Amino acid sequence: MALKLNHMSFGSQKLPSFALPAMASFGSPKFFMASPLRSASKKVDNLKNTFMPHEEVQVEVTHSMSPQKIEIFKSLDNWVENNILIHLKPTEKSWQPQDFLPDSKSDGFYEQVKELQERAKEIPDDYFVVLVGDMITEEALPTYQSQLNLTDGVRDETGSSLTSWAIWTRAWTAEENRHGDLLNKYLYLSGRVDMRQIEKTIQNLIGSGMDVKIENNPYKLFIYTSFQERATFVSHKNTSKLVAEHGDIELAKLCGFIAADEKRHETAYTKIIEKLFEIDPDETVRAFADMMRNKIVMPAHLMYDGRDENLFNHFSTVAQRLGVYTTKDYTDILEFLVDRWMVKDLTGLSADGRKAQDFVCELPLRLRKLEEKAQLVAKRAPTIPFSWIYDRKLML
């Protein structure tokens, strides 16, 4: 999965930090130093705080879907087999990262690496920041599979379940896994980036998880993945085009192959929501509206390199400035999904369903106004260092 612009965040304002609740007092204050229980609690608190997300994570509703709705998803197993699994590719027909990288067993390996590095020299630092951000997002795949397997009605109950939902989740994860592998190896070989800082960011991101307000609800999950896969497709496609303009056709090619995968996955997820609109339009449109009210927060929004508290915002702002993924793209995706799912044509909705329908259909016009704000912010953006590129400074 992948890129990552919170459409409401265009500047470098500091996000709220995560605050732990105050520890309860287990004894009289005058015996504080002699209280093993309190001392142990403080140690646990401090250790826990070490692994907390650096941003505030809101308390989230869980398991918001009724048991009756869960049965809908169980009843769709055969439909998923016939309509969704067809968007997967068998391993033997899939590209692998090694198809695009120097062959370490080849006598010309070092020459191939040198050629790769020579091409990479022509690419500006800005593009490498976007490539790194994309790769870090892809490398947090364990979090995304966990999210799918936390979702009621579609989770893989055993780790090797033979339901169509479970097969999709595992196979989708396996396909996505190649994306981070490929970008990671390319960036390492390029010699242009600080891999240790990047690896720290990946570890922090996986350790922090993601906070996307899905509530274990598959209606919301598949709306989120529909949006996210299209966003990733747009991002990788635009990156491919831009690096080609700087002469690195090989890098453009690998970004294009990743984009094609994301497009297939987008098709699958949007078909799921299309089916849900067919059989349960009221619940589906209300879930759509809920997700858009909360905003589609991209999966890497908790990224942290140990230095920059606003790293995700800064990365996203660079992507916005380059035209890799923009506020316009966010709104275009929303409009695309509204049209794809024919939300304006829904009938027979409840009062809440009609309100949700109106909200979703009117939202793109409201978001267009934010595009102007993004452009104004871009014109007065500061210059900051990125640890991923050895603290070289970029204009946001």
Image (cartoon, rainbow, N blue to C red):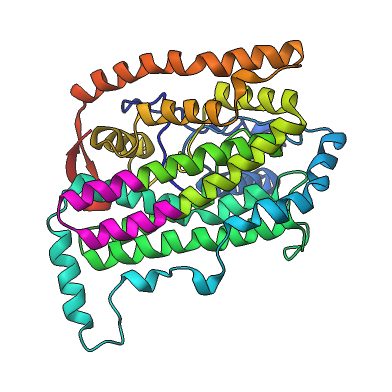
Residue 299 vertical position relative to residue 389 in the rendered view, above or below: above
Instruction: Residue 124 in the image: state x and y as whole percent.
Output: 16, 48
Instruction: Residue 44 in the image: state x and y as whole percent.
Output: 62, 48
The number of discs equals 0
Residue 286 vertical position relative to residue 185 in the rendered view, above or below: above
Horizontal side of 389 relative to 140 (left or right) equals: left
**Does the stretch in magenta take in 44?**
no
Name the chief secondary structure element in magenta: helix
Farthest residue toward the right?
68
Residue 36 vertical position relative to residue 111 in the rendered view, above or below: above
Instruction: Residue 48 in the image: state x and y as whole percent.
Output: 58, 47
Q: What's the magenta region?
A: 237-260
**Does the stretch in magenta take in 241?**
yes
Q: Residue at x 68, y 22 (%)?
A: 286
Which quadrant of the rendered structure holds the C terminus?
A: top left
Note whether residue 117 is visible.
yes
Horizontal side of 168 relative to 52 (left or right) equals: right
Q: Quadrant of residue 220?
A: top right
Instruction: Residue 296 in the image: state x and y as whole percent.
Output: 51, 31
Horizontal side of 9 relative to 140 (left or right) equals: left
Note whether residue 391 is visible.
no
